[in-house]
Amino acid sequence: MSKKWVYLFDEGNTTMKDLLGGKGANLAEMTNASLPVPPGFTITTEACNAYFDAGEQFPAGMWDQVVAAIATIEKRTGKKLGDPANPLLVSVRSGAKFSMPGMMDTVLNLGLNDATDAGLAQLTGNERFALDAYRRFIALFGRIVLDADGRPFEDILDKYKAQTAGGKDTDMTTDMLRQIVVEFKAEVHRQTGQDFPTDPYEQMRMAIKAVFSSWFGKRAVDYRNNQNIPHDLGTAVNVQTMVFGNMGDDSGTGVAFTRNPATGERKLYGEYLMNAQGEDVVAGVRTPHPIADMHKELPAIYDQFAQIAERLEQHYRDVQDMEFTIERGKLYMLQTRNGKRTADAAVNVAVDMANEGLITKQEAVMRIEPKQVEQLLHRRIDPNARLTVIAQGLNASPGAGSGMAAFDPDTAEKWAHEGKKVILVRLETSPDDVHGMISAQGILTARGGATSHAAVVARGLGKPCVSGCEVLLIDEDKREFTVAGTDYRVQEGNLMSINGSTGEVILGEVPMIEGDLSPKLKTLLGWADEIRDLGTWTNADYPRDARRARDFGAEGIGLCRTEHMFFEPERLPVVQKMILAKTDEDREAYLAQLLPFQRSDFEGIFQAMDGCPVIIRLIDPPLHEFLPKHEDLLVEVTELRIKGNNPALLKEKEELLGAVELMRESNPMLGLRGIRLGITMPGITRMQVRAIFEAACNCAQEGVVVKPEIMIPLTGHVNELKVARGLLEPVAQAVMEEKGITVDYKFGTMIEIPRAALTADQVAEYAEFFSYGTNDLTQTTFGYSRDDAEGKFLLKYVEMGILPMNPFQTLDRDGVGKLVRMGVELGRKTRPNLEVGICGEHGGDPNSIEFCQMAGLNYVSCSPFRVPVARLAAAQAAIRYPRS
């Protein structure tokens, strides 16, 4: 007996998404709930994978099961595929486990040919409707299945629409549609060299293959890469009896959400068109009406739909994105799925549903993706900015963006790869534009509504979008747009901006400000704080960064880099003189000049972090980084020698060049830096420790609760740490004695050398805390120079699948992670209460934060703007991997 590849809608349920895809599972669930769903069946995701495994051939038994399922549908509907007297017409749609709106292919009205179209006209008494369905089928099948260019079909359609008074597809006459069908079939033959297929079963076979193949189409692959969806899931294929929204003024079609997907407001949100098919709403062929208008136009249908929408939301306990058709006054539900929504809406919906008792607080926390929190902190237009608003469209996806106008997705992608900011401008977007949408700062379309392809995809990507801006006159050949009734013109490459929150199109680049925490986001993050185990600290070098991080919920500073303070303009000359000093006395004198600067810096940090721990890393980079570049000095010296007009300056520059040459190293990253510098030139780190403790004591005397932790970087051997701590701790004790006050403090080290992790039990004898510097630990574990690797081969490795991801963005659990785990376990054998955290860029990466939860770390530390992300990710990690 062959494997079961095909399930009728009444054979599945919502738990079968792995097998039936999200769409098929939800259609089955609605069917079993006795909702008005046109009958159909689903071909499984397993069949899709088997199709590719067999070299793009249907698996054994699948086609026979398809034919049998069609026979069942024929019995239930009383219609027959290919029968001119009462033809069965079906849609063939994709449907993966995870919603990928518009990324794969759909064919509508399958089963039409000259004979069945004539039968449909006679059966319905509406020849115009039948011809309209036929021309749609030929164009859609030609583009999707036969790989024909879709633009000639649009050109033919536009030619006839231009001959009507209204200029819309609904204004075309029956005779016009009859001629369009003839010209469409001729266009298919011109492009493919073959006649349009007329056998409905052959149409079905070809359409199923096309939907399977769309799983590996470029737009689908690009979308999955962007959304981190695995490529081995496959897509299901849903075959469903057609119902028609284009049968006249008592028919229509629409898309609606149970709550506003842009704001989260608890109110039906969507659009519909009368006398239209679903593709008209999504593609923006005509501007649709708000769903609220249907309450006036079709009150009984609206009330029925509103009841179904409420029932579906209560059943799925989430916002539903629904497609429906009205055929001759009867409502049919074609799809429901969890609705894609903006980050703002996602937070508002999660909090509201928890407060309504529909979901728990834990579920609310799990509903939000960490990247959505990050989106909420992105830029918006400065309200004080003076704007030149040149057009107004629909506010389809919130946020704001500026960039160079690009009129096709390939240009947008190319410019983005070159580091340019781009606004993608299109008449309307299609699934083929996704790679350009991913690359753009924002999307602007002349057509389409709030549920158009552009709007839905932009919201999913977290990109601002203005759609349906009908005053834009886009000339794709000249690569420019003008604004109707004005002199405004934007050509490709010109700077422009959009405000997806207001629908404004703006000339030029505009000033932006960063986002902030909304009240409901604060509520959600408060729930996350109740759940998480990991502390969320921040990397901050200045008081302003520390204050910002505290506003975002930071509980401490995990990395304060003291060397950044040395680069301030008034300090750098003193630093350089200190480095070039010929005697210890001279060096100490310059260090004494630097001491007040450092003390003031630390006082500001301690005040901003009152009551929170502050880890201050002593000087880490090699000293030559504070001096002019060797290449620049060489040029200066050479020019001065040639000119010969400034011997004093020449002597100064020659001495500086000599000093730089003495300090040059073959591999500075592994040279004289960090703890090695502190041991060989102890005056620098002694000055820093004195500054830290003078600042701590001063603040403590003013009532500030200080918790300084001094981090000694780059330990490779326990004896280094033993010596360094022996040099520095007496300075701390001396300052506290001088000030007459004692503060609690810790000395610890940064683990960024594999040997330190391997001998962590020894290192912990002299370290009261470990902070994993995973940027450098990744470099030293892989043997990669990050700057060289990312520029030359690392991204290629990821593309080729040699590495699963960039290890500098997401922690390498198998290699670097093993060292982290080992260090934690060994360190706590020696010192059970050892504080352990992470302060590399991985501290703000949700995947890496999950690892930190699993590895038993105490905290993660990241940049201020990623603190809210870390708070949420830490809570989600605690839910997935609770600590005993």
Image: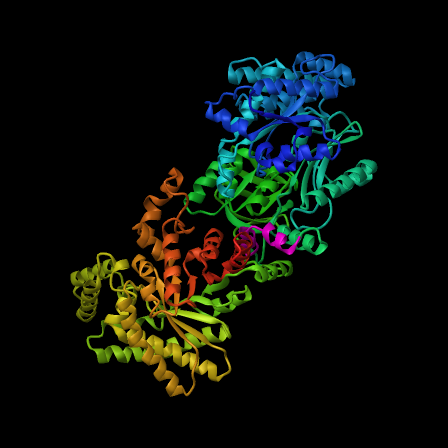
Residue numbers of the magenta segment: 360-378
Residue 18, percent from left and from top: 57, 35
Q: Is residue 508 above or below residue 225?
A: below
Q: Main secondary structure of the magenta part?
A: helix
Residue 286 visible in the picture: no
* Visual colour scheme: rainbow
**Apparent side of residue 141 relative to residue 620 in the rendered image (left or right):** right
**Is residue 364 shown in magenta?**
yes
Residue 620 against residue 104 in the figure, above or below: below
Vertically, is 552 above or below 248?
Answer: below
Identity of the residue drawn at 18% across and 68% down: 655
Q: Name the one closer to the observer, 507 or 872.
A: 872
Which residue does the image show at 46% across and 71% down from the upper left?
613
* Direction from residue 24 to residue 591 in the image, left or right: left
Q: Camera-side residue: 138 or 871?
A: 871
Magenta highlight on residue 822:
no
Quick check: can you spot residue 490? yes
Q: Quadrant of residue 174?
A: top right
Residue 758 in the image: state x and y as whole percent. 32, 58
